[in-house]
Image: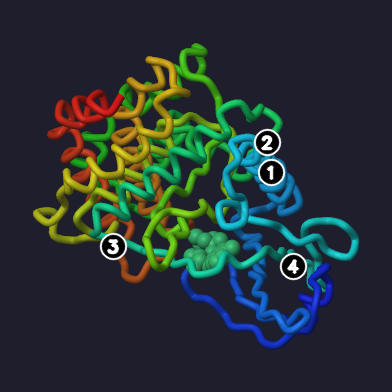
């Protein structure tokens, strides 16, 4: 089906002019579409939901709509503008927020946020602080949303305890006969199993509250104003699920503060940039500080290491299973990724006191 025909299924006013594929995302297929409405140019985003990742798109959309409405209500109460700060979904003809085509593909449409840009791995500390503010604001505006009403779009996504158990099971099974190569990595991860399970235990013991989490807190999921670089909106809401604040903060720091890609082979290059860590933390904490308990505050620094260990365990498990989940570019790719994340976790451990002090200082 052509994008023009998909557009016709949504309640978009005016005449379709053209569609352009955007390649900046990696999960969904995203198009920018141009309309003319009473001599005015208007743009929208049309997106096909990736059903390999999201098995129940209708429930994902239900999550997105309910949290977006909450964001709108809160922003209105604060007299803040909602034009460019939240995603506005267009309804399809059947009044759902998605259209399902003959092939069973799910499509959604929302207003394009004008004059916005995204950055993949920004170096500019102002931009990083703004990203921190955006995810912090997202968190704080949703702090009173009942997260138990949300569907778990990827079950057990951050169940680090379970992920570690599964890793050691794969190691014991050794289906790909690779266990012999990963002794040092398994030994390290075993020594960190208790730490990796610590947040799960705190959730079980009701020490950390379940809130709304974004679960993909990369900088490229924030739209910035193209002229001022101020953060506008948090996008890519498919993975919004119940979770704890430390997951979102921890994963954001893992991404933003690393000096290398996720699959760096030279472990000497795996470092953390403390200025970037500082900038994101400053922005994030400034927005969440009034909504967090002391226990949640304390969990932020652990979140960085737990999330890094979790990803290391996922890459290593996939290597042991014979590379069935993550796409690989070469034979040892998952092992390289696991080693890189382990090195990063060690780096975070080495800087742990400074990390804790910095978070405290912005409280
Ligand atoms: N409402 C919007 N306004 C402007 N650009 C957008 C909007 N939504 C998405 N984009 C652009 O499309 C890209 C991909 O969107 P995203 O929802 O992050 O998909 P993916 O899950 O593939 O990462 C973004 O990085 C951004 O450049
Ligand atoms: Mg994205």
Query: Which residue corresponds to mark 2?
Result: 150
Which circle's residue, 4 or 1, is located before the other in the chain? 1
Q: Give left or right: position of 195 versus 43.
A: left
Which circle's residue, 3 or 2, is located before the other in the chain? 2
Query: Which residue corresponds to mark 1?
Result: 63
Query: Which residue corresponds to mark 3?
Result: 332
Identify the element where label 4 is drawn: loop
Task: Quadrant for the N terminus, please.
Answer: bottom right
Which circle's residue, 4 or 3, is located before the other in the chain? 4
Identify the element where label 2 is drawn: loop
Residue at 74% x, 67% y: name it: 105
Q: Position of residue 297 (x, y in %)?
A: 36, 22
Mark linked to residue 105: 4
| 4 vs 2, front mark | 2
In the image, the residue with mark 1 has its CB under 8 Å from the nearest atom of ligand 1: no
| 3 vs 1, front mark | 1
Residue at 63% x, 36% y: name it: 74
Q: Position of residue 42 (x, y in %)?
A: 67, 75
């Amino acid at each position: 089906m052509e994008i023009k025909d998909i557009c016709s299924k949504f309640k978009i006013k005016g005449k379709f002019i053209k569609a352009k594929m955007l390649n900046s995302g990696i999960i969904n297929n995203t198009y920018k579409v141009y309309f003319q409405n009473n001599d005015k140019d208007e743009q929208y985003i049309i997106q096909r939901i990736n059903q390999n990742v999201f098995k129940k798109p209708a429930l994902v959309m239900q999550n997105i709509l309910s949290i977006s409405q909450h964001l709108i209500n809160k922003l209105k109460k604060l007299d803040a503008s909602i034009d460019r700060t939240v995603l506005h979904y267009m309804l399809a003809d059947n009044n759902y927020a998605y259209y399902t085509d003959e092939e069973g593909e799910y499509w959604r449409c929302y207003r394009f946020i004008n004059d916005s840009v995204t950055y993949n791995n920004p170096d500019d500390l102002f931009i990083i602080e703004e990203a921190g503010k955006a995810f912090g604001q997202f968190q704080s505006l949703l702090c009173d949303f009942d997260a138990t009403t949300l569907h778990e779009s990827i079950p057990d996504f951050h169940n680090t305890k379970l992920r570690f158990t599964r890793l050691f099971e794969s190691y014991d099974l050794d289906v790909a006969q690779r266990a012999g190569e990963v002794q040092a990595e398994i030994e390290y991860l075993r020594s960190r199993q208790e730490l990796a399970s610590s947040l799960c235990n705190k959730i079980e013991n009701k020490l950390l509250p379940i809130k709304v989490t974004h679960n993909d807190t990369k900088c490229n999921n924030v739209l910035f104003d193209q002229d001022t670089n101020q953060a506008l909106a948090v996008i890519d809401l498919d993975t919004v699920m119940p979770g704890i604040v430390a997951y979102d903060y921890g994963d954001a720091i893992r991404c933003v503060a690393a000096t290398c890609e996720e699959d760096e082979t030279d472990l000497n290059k795996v470092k953390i940039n403390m200025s970037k860590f500082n900038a994101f933390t400053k922005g994030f904490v400034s927005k969440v500080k009034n909504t967090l308990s002391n226990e949640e505050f304390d969990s932020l620094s652990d979140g960085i290491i737990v999330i890094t260990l979790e990803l290391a365990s996922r890459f290593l498990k996939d290597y042991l299973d014979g590379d069935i989940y993550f796409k690989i570019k070469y034979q040892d790719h998952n092992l390289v990724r696991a080693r890189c994340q382990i090195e990063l976790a060690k780096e975070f451990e080495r800087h742990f006191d400074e990390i804790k002090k910095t978070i405290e200082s912005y409280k």
